[in-house]
Image (cartoon, grey):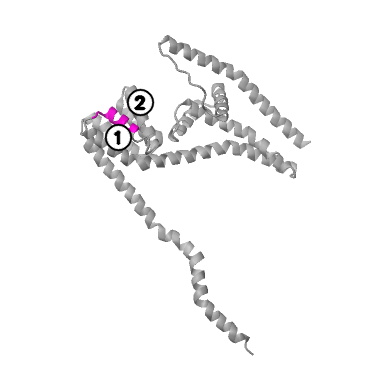
Amino acid sequence: MTRALALQLAMGIVLAMLLAILVLLPRLRRAERLQARIAASRGVVEVRRPESAPLPQRIARRIGQAVMASGIVKGETLAELQRTVVAAGFRGQRAVAVFIGAKVLLMVALPFVMLPLSAGMGPMGRNLLVAGGAVAGLVLPDMALRRMREAHARQVERGLADALDLMVICAEAGLPLEAAVDRVASEMAEANRAVAAEFANVGTELRILSDRRQALQNMGERTGLESLRRLGGTLAQTLQYGTPLSQALRTLAGELRHETLMRFEARAARLPALLTLPTIAFILPCIFFIVGGPAVLRVLDIAARP
């Protein structure tokens, strides 16, 4: 009876979510049509591209947009999600919608996946397993996004010194700041896509925002890296005080390379401590066996004689 009640409750939740999505989707379509009419009235021609995203991603995006339109996710939470998604290397509201939709889909789908696994369990174990599946569906996207954010930050930090060297070359060649940033973004696209994306975003903000120093300061706020904050502050100071751009960038590039070398030296200094346990576990027993084995065999031979 408890299992049937749990199944009915889960089906009721799924049906309620589907009905909410069906109610909210027309509102989203009307909002999209209204935005298209506003853009057309301003003379902006929108080029519609065919949907190239996979079907699960499109479904998750639609569900996420419906949840965002319903007002369930508050403004502060949505802003925090936007910052986290941007720090992971994704841009735009679609990425936030896909993330929210993935959480909802996993929260609903994982309990149904767990139900066949609870065939031989009691009511308490079955309910705990279903609840654990729902909690895992909520937590797994956060863990995956955190891993992607850390990987994106490591990739940006790895290629930042090379990007600064390119900026030094562009500045010495006489290019202004916006052109130098765009050039670095295009040249780094093959070597380091994360750095290229960050510099491309900075170039776009430099052209759009009225305060160029704010665009440079946003560089470090997106990823949370101290090196990008220093780069943004250095470039903002060159714009404010008129200091030579190439000299400031060369100094900063040297500091970043020195810090990278210091990190490598710190990791190399940790190797003896990390190798102690494998040495004790694998090498010392072999040495004891080789050194003490003949003596043990000799003692056993002497003890076996009459």
> Taking 304 as reference, is 252 above or below it?
above
> Taking 264 as reference, is 129 above or below it?
above
> Taking 19 as reference, is 137 above or below it?
below
The furthest residue to the top:
41
Q: Specify the label residue 104 is tagged with.
A: none
Q: Specify the label residue 204 is tagged with.
A: 2
Main secondary structure type of the part rendered in magenta? helix
Tell me if mark 2 has few (under 14), some (14-19) or many (20+) residues whose alpha carbon lies within 10 angstroms of its own: some
Q: Can you give x and y, in whole percent of width and height, for residue 220 in the image?
A: 36, 35
Query: Mark 1 sits on what residue?
Result: 233
**Which region is colored magenta?**
175-186
Q: Can you give x and y, in whole percent of width and height, for residue 121 in the image?
A: 74, 44
Question: Does label 1 or label 2 sit earlier along the sequence?
Answer: 2
The furthest residue to the right:
1
Q: Can you give x and y, in whole percent of width and height, for residue 199 in the image?
A: 35, 32
Residue at (60% x, 39% y) in the render: 136
In which image quadrant can residue 276 be found? bottom left
Cα distance between the residues tagged 1 and 2: 18 Å
